[in-house]
């Protein structure tokens, strides 16, 4: 997954190398009219949970509006079309959701626009500053704007959100941002960067400034003595399907993605392209590979919120996902976000001259918890 020249010893992250092939068709193939959009094409955000502007020729991806949690607000997005949960892989306007009645349009004067119901421009990505003769969603899941007699002038693959798809490349300076939560597409507090030195780094960031608190995972793929041995692009490779972990079948039968999750893990997933029993869907995305191996111990710096936020502690589940719990007598800051940190359920008010703190506070015991920030902390091998 991590390309370098010459191809010498690859880092651990290189084991994401996949074959992308078409699966068996599950529904009628899209027509030319909804795979290639020309001047005058438009789509209005409606009550439907998903309104498609166009499909890829294979029908496996769709581009359009996705309604957010039954609200009258919509995300302009790309998603897997042929699986039940229609997983979103790219979005444009997460910090400026489109209200019901908003419209995307390729106008007669070659402007690709996103406007609210009053006709005012909704900005959310540089895609809306481009002039184009047509739009198309490719079989790879890459949404492109094209000009006549020219190459593509804009590609969603060059502007990833939180997910990479097979054949997608992240160049030096490229960034992935996690989502805030699994149900909120606003920018989260983790980012992945390919830095000029040649390393892929995972970092916690301060919002809204994007100030980095430092890395909690580094590929160690830079070479100060020979820059030709440093990493120069991050590639979700479609050339072969040999993975170091995970029991999956042929790449012909599975969809793949690699995602920077809201919990800070960078994880590769696979999903069957059709129901295994031929009738009902019971499968979902399953994990193939992820870093870091232990998210709970990965973030141990003096700044930032750690994996779980303030006043909470972290347990690792069997899938490498951090599970966060509040300390006794603390509650989640945001009940809908278990990574938001915790606050006291009742703040005691006590002036020194009025009461004895030992009379209003209780000492509690929490077993089997390690405190990496403590001066007396020491981790022993198991």
Image (spheres, rainbow, N blue to C red):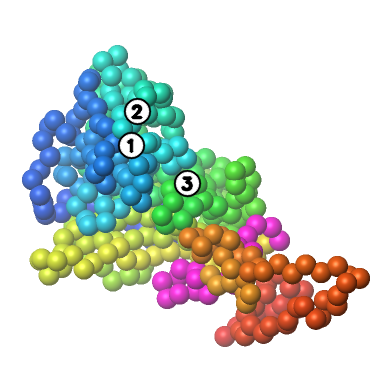
Task: Check the picture and name the quadrant holding the C terminus.
Answer: bottom right
Would you call the spot at circle 3 few (<14 residues within 10 Å), some (14-19), or many (20 or more)? some
x and y, in percent, of residue 255 in the image: 25, 56
Say whether disc 3 or disc 1 marks the residue closer to the N-terminus. Answer: 1
Residue behind mark 2 = 117
**Secondary structure of the residue carrying numbered label 3:** strand
Q: Which mark is residue 100?
A: 1
**Secondary structure of the residue carrying numbered label 1:** loop
- Which residue corresponds to the image point at 21% horizontal and 62% vertical from the top-left? 272
Examine the structure image and report whether residue 309 is included in the region drawn in magenta: yes
x and y, in percent, of residue 343 in the image: 64, 65
**Secondary structure of the residue carrying numbered label 2:** loop
Would you call the spot at circle 2 few (<14 residues within 10 Å), some (14-19), or many (20 or more)? some
Residue behind mark 3 = 186
Tell me the magenta residue range. 302-323
Residue in the foreground of this view, choosing between 175 and 339: 339
- Which residue corresponds to the image point at 13% horizontal and 30% vertical from the top-left? 33
């Amino acid at each position: 997954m991590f390309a370098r020249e010459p191809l010498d010893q690859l880092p651990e992250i290189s084991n994401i190398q996949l074959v992308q092939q078409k699966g068996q068709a599950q529904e009628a193939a899209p027509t030319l009219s909804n795979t290639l959009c020309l001047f005058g094409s438009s789509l209005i955000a409606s009550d439907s949970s998903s309104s498609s502007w166009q499909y890829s020729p294979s029908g496996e991806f769709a581009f359009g509006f996705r309604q957010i949690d039954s609200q009258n607000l919509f995300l302009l997005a790309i998603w897997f079309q042929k699986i039940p949960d229609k997983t979103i892989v790219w979005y444009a306007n997460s910090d400026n959701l489109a209200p019901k009645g908003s419209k995307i349009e390729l106008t007669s004067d070659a402007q690709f626009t996103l406007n609210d119901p009053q006709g005012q421009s909704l900005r959310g990505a540089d895609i809306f500053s481009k002039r184009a003769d047509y739009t198309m969603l490719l079989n790879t899941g890459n949404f492109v704007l094209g000009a006549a007699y020219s190459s593509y002038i804009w590609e969603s693959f060059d502007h990833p959100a939180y997910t990479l798809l097979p054949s997608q490349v992240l160049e030096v300076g490229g960034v992935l941002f996690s989502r805030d939560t699994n149900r909120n597409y606003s920018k989260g507090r983790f980012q992945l960067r390919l830095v000029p030195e040649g390393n892929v780094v995972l970092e916690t960031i301060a919002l809204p400034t994007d100030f980095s608190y430092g890395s909690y995972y580094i590929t160690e793929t830079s070479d100060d003595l020979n820059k030709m041995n440093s990493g120069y692009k991050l590639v979700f490779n479609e050339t072969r399907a040999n993975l170091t972990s995970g029991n999956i079948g042929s790449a012909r039968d599975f969809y793949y993605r690699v995602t920077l999750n809201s919990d800070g893990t960078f994880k590769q997933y696979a999903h069957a392209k059709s129901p295994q029993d031929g009738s009902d869907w019971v499968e979902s995305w399953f994990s193939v590979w992820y870093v870091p191996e232990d998210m709970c111990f990965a973030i141990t710096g003096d700044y930032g919120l750690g994996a779980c936020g303030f006043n909470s502690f972290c347990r690792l589940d069997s899938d490498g996902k951090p599970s966060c719990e509040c300390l006794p007598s603390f509650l989640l800051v945001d009940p809908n976000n278990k990574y938001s940190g915790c606050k006291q359920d009742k703040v005691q008010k006590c002036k020194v001259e009025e009461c004895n703190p030992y009379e209003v506070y209780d000492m509690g015991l929490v077993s089997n918890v390690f405190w990496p920030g403590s001066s007396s902390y020491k981790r022993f091998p198991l």
